[in-house]
Image: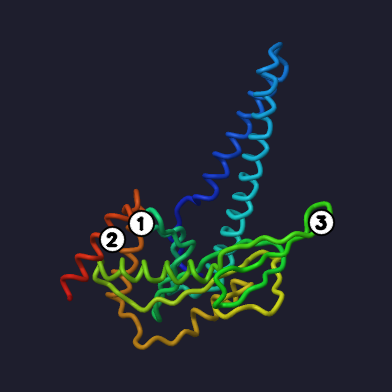
Amino acid sequence: MAVVHKKGSPLFDQAINYGLGGVACLAISFFMVYSRSDILHVIGIAFFFLGGYLFSQCSRRCSGSWGEHKALSALSEALPDQYHLFVNVSVHEKMESDMVVVGPNGVFIVEVKSFKGTLEGSVNDRKWVLHKVGREGGRYTKIIKNPLGQLKRNIAILSQYLKLERCSAWIDGVVLFPNDDTEWQDGVPEKCFCEAKGVAEHITCFEPRRPLTENLMGKLIASLEKCQEGSAMTLEEFTDKTQALQKRFA
């Protein structure tokens, strides 16, 4: 079983905030609707709909948080003891990876997407289509960003960060869809997996150009732990540091 370096889930924290906001809006709505003022009646109705919106956002983030938890539990059990699994790694304020794995054969980013429905899209498509069935049986589609694009950006950012930390290593990445209700219209694209077991096999079977030394693994683990402590760098700070590094080696 992998060694897990975990911190609180941002999605879970957001779900709590949205839920509390929804309760507050419904309480205000109840008070205003039963007042004697027509204006307050209108405002109360507005708060009622706002509360419904906040509860829907709460539900979405709860679903995403549960998907991350499910993926974490399954992946940590499937990986051998010599692997370290980091949860919610933030290099800077505009970047966060769901999971980062460090092992003897490299560094791996795992992005988790808890979609429900049938996905249509390929590796090179900028947008994917999600076909869903509503609670009352109605069918509709939703356009989503190709998560492989996010994965590619996060690999580039983490690579730059590790160079700043003087412990650069090869980084590979995959996208995990842990929800049992996720289906694919034209087959699962490359670098995408529907089970944590498949991700674990991909990671453990990956053949690097050269294995990581114990010393380098120690530096990587320490650098990733820093991304879980306190506040992440601002995007401006990260950009300034990477530009300075590039000038140094230009």
The numbered dot on residue 92 is 1
Residue at image point 50% right, 85% down: 205
Res 129 quadrant in image: bottom right
Q: Residues within 10 Å of mark 1 (few under 14, many from 20)?
A: many
Q: Nearer the viewer, residue 186 or 168?
A: 186
Residue at image point 68% right, 34% down: 49
227 to the left or right of 49? left
Q: Name the residue beneath numbered marker 3.
A: 138
Residue 52 image point, x, y percent: 68, 37
Q: Nearer the viewer, residue 72 or 154?
A: 154
Give the structural element (helix, strand or loop) at label 3: loop
Going by the numbered disc 2, the residue's amino acid type is Thr
Give the structural element (helix, strand or loop) at label 1: strand
125 to the left or right of 40? left
Residue at image point 54% right, 77% down: 124
Q: Name the residue beneath numbered marker 2.
A: 239
